[in-house]
Amino acid sequence: MLLVIDIGNTNTVLGVFEGESLVAHWRLTTQRDRTVDEYGVQCRTLFSLAGIDIAKITGIAIASVVPPLNGTLRDMAMQYLHIDPLFIDPMMDLGMPILYNPPHDVGADRIVNAIAAFEKFGGPTIVADFGTATTFDAISKAGEYLGGVIAPGIMISAEALFLRTAKLPRVEIKAPGRVIGATTVESMQSGLYFGYLGLVEGILARMKAELGEATVVGTGGLAPLIRQGCPQIQFVEETLILDGLRLVFARFHTIT
C-alpha cells in the first residue's frame, strides 16, 4: 500500500492507495510546530480508525510547499513506518516537460496536479486549485506544463478585509442567494463570492484565449463551492493531487 501526503500552507491531505484504488483519505490543518512523534501518533490513529494495517504501507510519496516540515515528515516516515519517503521535486524526471523559468520555482503540488489532470483528461487542460493561494496551471495538448497564474485565495481576501477594517466581521465563505446584500454580513459574502467568481471567470477566459479551448478541472477544498457559480469549471476532482502522487510514485517504484 502507498501513503501519499500533500503538505499545503493551510491543509495537509493524506491518502492511502491499494494498487490504483484510493481506500482512505483525510484533510488536516497544517501545523508547522507539530513534532515527529505527534505526526507519527496521528498517522497511526488515522490508520487504526480506517482499519488500515500500518505494516502494509510499503511506500510514501510527499509533495510539500512548506519546507520547514520536510525534515519532520521524513523523520516520521523513517521512525514510524521505516520507509524513506519520496519527496516530489520539479527537477526530477516526472514524465512531463516543464516549460517554466526556472523549472524548480514551480510548486511540487502544481506539477503533481498537472500530471494527474493530463492523465485523466488529456490536453489542453487548465487546473484551478483553490487553496491558500488560487493557482491556475496550463497543460498543452502534448502534455507539457506551460505555466499559469497565482492569485490570492478567497480566504486570504476575507481575512484581509477583516484585519484591515475596524467594523467588518469575519464571515463564512458561502454562495449568497443574491448579489445585493441586505446586511453587512450578506454584503461581505456577496463581495467575496461574486467578486471571486469574476476573478476566476476572467482568468480562465484569458487563459483560453492564449491556450485555445481547454478542459477546466477544479480542485482544492473550495472547488465545489466555486463551481456552483462558475460553469467554466467542467470537472471537480477533490483528490486530484493524491492521484498525481500515486502516478509519480509509480514512475519510480512498484505500488503493492
Image (spheres, grey):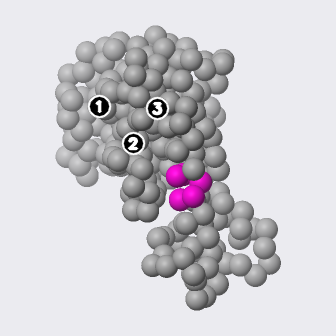
Q: Is residue 21 left or right of residue 154?
A: left
Residue for badge 3: 212
Give how far across and how far down residue 174 sits, in percent.
48, 70
Q: Over which residues does the magenta segment extend?
A: 197-201
Task: For the N terminus, give its image quadrant.
Answer: top left
- Mark 2 and 1 residues: CB-CB less than 8 Å, in contact? yes
- Disc 2 versus disc 1: distance between alpha carbons? 10 Å
Q: Is residue 66 left or right of residue 212?
A: right
Mark 1, Cα crowd under 10 Å, few <14 / some 14-19 / many 20+, is few
Note whether 211 is above or below 23 in the view shown: above
Give how far across and how far down residue 83 sits, in percent.
38, 22
Q: Residue at x 50, y 23 (%)?
A: 145
Write down the quadrant of residue 214 in the picture: top left
Residue for badge 2: 217
Judge whether residue 94 is colored magenta: no
Viewer can see residue 122? yes
- Disc 2 versus disc 3: distance between alpha carbons? 15 Å
Q: Secondary structure at mark 3?
A: loop
Q: Residue at x 40, y 17 (%)?
A: 142
Write down the quadrant of residue 246 in the picture: top left
Q: Amino acid at mark 2?
A: Val
Note whether 65 is above or below 159 in the view shown: above
Q: Secondary structure at mark 2?
A: strand
Please report whichever mark, 2 or 1, sits nearer to the chain's N-terminal start: 1
Mark 2, Cα crowd under 10 Å, few <14 / some 14-19 / many 20+, is many
